[in-house]
Image (cartoon, helix red, strand yellow):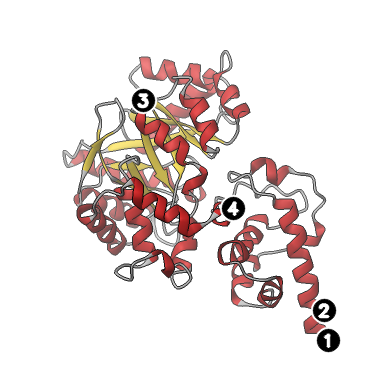
Amino acid sequence: MNYTEYGKTEKKVSVVGFGGLRFDLSKSNEENAELIKYAYSKGINYFDTAPGYCDDRSEDIFGVAFREMIKEGKLDFIVSTKGKPKVYDTAEKAVNAVKTSLKRLGVPKIHFYHVWCIRKMEHYELCMKKGGQYEGLLKCKEEGLIDHIVFSSHQPGEEVIKVLDENKFEGVTMGINLLNFPYRWKGVTHAYKNEYGVVAMNPLSGGSIPSHEKELAFLTKKVETATQLALRFNISSPEITITLVGFGNNHDIDEACRIADESKPFTKEDINKLRNLLGENMNEICTGCGYCKVCPKGINIPGYMLFFNEKQMFKKSDEEMIQSVYGLEYWNYSMSNKKFAAECVKCGKCEEECTQHLPIIDRLKQIAQWEEKGTNDVTV
């Protein structure tokens, strides 16, 4: 495993990190903890989680693993967790959140604590208000409960730069992958040049890349799969400090570690070639984060937006999308639908929450037309 320094913190971190959002919830906490311990044995030392991940089990799963590792004298792992400014909107709430995470994780301190999910500048301002979350985190830092205050962002690159230039944080975690990197690359390069740590989450675009190996084959040189290329892009870009991967089994850990050991750094020329291949439309895909699941009518917006990726990523025609309404992709995404796209009341709540700032209302309107046409065609 290769290691690098996280910004100016002097923390040595593995270039591959363990993202705690993909545990198999059919398994016990103890069974899932074995995966963490295996990753540690392979050299991964950065472990990222958050309250609420995996039906609020993620921190507890890490806690099982960490307690066992500490008992065995393995103390050189690095812990990252998070708290939202909208949830912990006072210093007191922020302090209590840190203490709760410490108890669940079974560790004496959290090395990197994120102000979680800054999607627009108002969220940053809420965090920084007098008596707010940041003030509480500073207190925790003074008491030795956390080492470094960082943030996770779903903003465009320009807004990431604005937050970094306030000099309140030591690093940033962003959704960066092979398909959407142009959307945030300005922020990535600015952070790198100014010696901030950069953690990349969602390297496989919410599963979209493994699901479309054939369609994305044009990006590879036929010596690797699109999934391998996506991991190599993140892991081997010098601008990215850590690539978080949500592991499901030991083989996935082995593969990521192999790529980390064998890959050569991506150059500016390599980046530009990818940018030209992808084209502008690839910036507008849904990553499946699920934050838009706030519809007052109960419309399954995350499912619909993932379905829309079929058009956005692969330039399918309206006719193809109409046919897809009764195809496998549609039912994979919409099988839990209780309400349909045509029932959208255009309240805008989903767009406010969207981490990619996508035109969700317009896309639902298009999908509603596909659904109507598809239904009519079948009826006839």
Q: How far is mark 4 from mark 2, CA to CA?
A: 29 Å
Q: Which tag, 3 or 2, sits closer to the chain's start? A: 3
Residue 102: in sight, yes or no?
no
Residue placed furthest toward the bottom: 380
The amino acid at mark 3 is: His
Q: How far is mark 3 from mark 2, CA to CA?
A: 57 Å
The residue to which callout 2 is attached is 376
Q: How far is mark 1 from mark 2, CA to CA?
A: 6 Å
Residue 284 marker: 4
Q: Nearer the viewer, residue 114 or 356?
A: 356
Cβ–Cβ under 8 Å for marks 3 and 1 = no
Of the 4 image quadrants, the one containing the C terminus is: bottom right
Tell me the SS state at disc 2: helix
Q: How far is mark 3 from mark 1, CA to CA?
A: 62 Å
Nearer to us: label 4 or label 3: 4
Q: Residues within 10 Å of mark 2 (few under 14, many from 20)?
A: few
The residue to which callout 3 is attached is 148
Image point (23%, 48%), residue name: 40
Nearer to us: label 4 or label 2: 4
Q: Where 288 falls versus 152 (above or below)? A: below
Q: Residues within 10 Å of mark 3 (few under 14, many from 20)?
A: many
Residue 380 marker: 1
